[in-house]
């Protein structure tokens, strides 16, 4: 009754555990960006269907998947290779797909783990739209895409467990180095297009995703963003309650934010007209 979509690029280490957590579905699709390791073979050995496409940016990649992958069922659960569905979440997903009401998508609660500890407090947001009707969902932004459902959204119980440091801190930094490049490009793109921004809607917009988008844009305009991000995560979100893992994670996120600041500044400088 529910298909599964897993996005991959060189995920031979994490994919087996992910596939095992979704083995309850008889329609598992691995959407691969031409991995150079054994990811594709791991997927096929587990009975998953493999579709490959060159990755360009997150929104375009996910929108292509929604429009072109031949899912067997009307509902799709989307996850990454370093994520695992818990038994409670599986039961909730099945129940929601059987009785969705008017909803076209459902949010799930994600638990991020670091240094053997659940980052219960330091996460910016634990809610993600992952159970969805493909024809009713589209994505925007080059990276960290915003989900835009075309209809009502619900929320289901259970946890999606996430292990972002499964390949080590070095791999996390390398991944976020590439993310920061796309974030800088997105910021520059928005500013050149005079993208609609409203500080008021960042606070009062009724739609969760509209509010999140406006809050991101408001945040990009703040001074001393890296330090502000650390303060928000470690103090505002009470990340200190997550111990050493919470402190380290908040520091890493502030470093990531600083990479975005530097790359945005570099783009603006390189694209600024020269005066002869």
Image (spheres, rainbow, N blue to C red):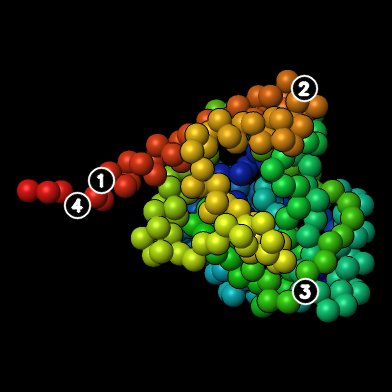
The residue that mark 4 highlights is 273
The residue that mark 1 highlights is 270
Give the alpha-carbon distance from disc 2 to disc 4, as whole Å.
48 Å
Label 4: few (<14), some (14–19) or many (≥20) C-alpha neighbours in 10 Å: few
Please name which of the two marks, 4 or 3, marks the residue nearer to the observer.
4
For label 3, the SS is loop
User: Residue 189: horizontal and vertical position, in percent?
Assistant: 40, 58
The residue that mark 3 highlights is 152
Give the alpha-carbon distance from disc 3 to disc 1, as whole Å.
43 Å
Please name which of the two marks, 2 or 4, marks the residue nearer to the observer.
4
Note whether 50 is above or below 127 in the view shown: below
Note whether 135 is above or below 165 in the view shown: below
The residue that mark 2 highlights is 243
- Do the CB atoms of the residues marked 2 and 1 lie less than 8 Å apart? no
User: Residue drawn at (51%, 43%), measured in percent from left and top?
Assistant: 222
Give the alpha-carbon distance from disc 4 to disc 3, as whole Å.
45 Å
Is residue 8 something one can see in this rendering? yes
Name which of mark 2 and mark 4 comes first in the sequence.
2
User: Residue 1: horizontal and vertical position, in percent?
Assistant: 84, 72
Label 3: few (<14), some (14–19) or many (≥20) C-alpha neighbours in 10 Å: few
User: Based on the displayed image, in which of its 4 quarters is residue 63 positioned?
Assistant: bottom right
Name which of mark 2 and mark 1 comes first in the sequence.
2
For label 2, the SS is helix
- Do the CB atoms of the residues marked 4 and 3 lie less than 8 Å apart? no
Q: Nearer the viewer, residue 94 or 253?
A: 253
């Amino acid at each position: 009754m529910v298909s599964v979509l897993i996005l991959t690029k060189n995920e031979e280490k994490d994919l087996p555990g992910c596939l095992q957590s979704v083995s309850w579905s008889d329609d598992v699709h691995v959407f691969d960006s031409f991995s150079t390791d054994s990811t594709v073979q791991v997927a096929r050995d587990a009975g998953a269907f493999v579709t490959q496409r060159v990755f360009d940016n997150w929104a375009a990649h996910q929108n292509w998947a929604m429009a072109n992958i031949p899912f067997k069922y009307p509902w799709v659960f989307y996850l990454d290779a370093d994520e695992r569905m818990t038994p409670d979440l599986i039961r909730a997903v099945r129940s929601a797909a059987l009785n969705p009401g008017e909803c076209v998508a459902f949010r799930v609660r994600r638990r991020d783990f670091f240094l053997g500890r659940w980052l219960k407090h330091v996460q910016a947001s634990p809610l993600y739209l992952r159970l969805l009707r493909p024809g009713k969902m589209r994505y925007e932004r080059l990276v960290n895409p915003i989900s835009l459902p075309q209809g009502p959204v619900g929320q289901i119980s259970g946890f999606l467990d996430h292990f972002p440091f499964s390949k080590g801190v070095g791999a996390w930094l390398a991944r976020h180095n590439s993310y920061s490049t796309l974030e800088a490009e997105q910021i520059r793109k928005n500013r050149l297009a005079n993208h609609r921004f409203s500080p008021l809607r960042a606070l009062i917009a009724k739609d969760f995703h509209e509010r999140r988008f406006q809050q991101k844009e408001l945040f990009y305009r703040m001074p001393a963003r890296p330090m502000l991000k650390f303060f928000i995560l470690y103090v505002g979100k009470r990340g200190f309650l997550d111990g050493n893992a919470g402190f380290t994670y908040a520091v890493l996120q502030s470093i990531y934010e600083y990479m975005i600041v530097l790359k945005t500044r570099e783009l603006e400088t390189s694209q600024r007209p020269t005066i002869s």
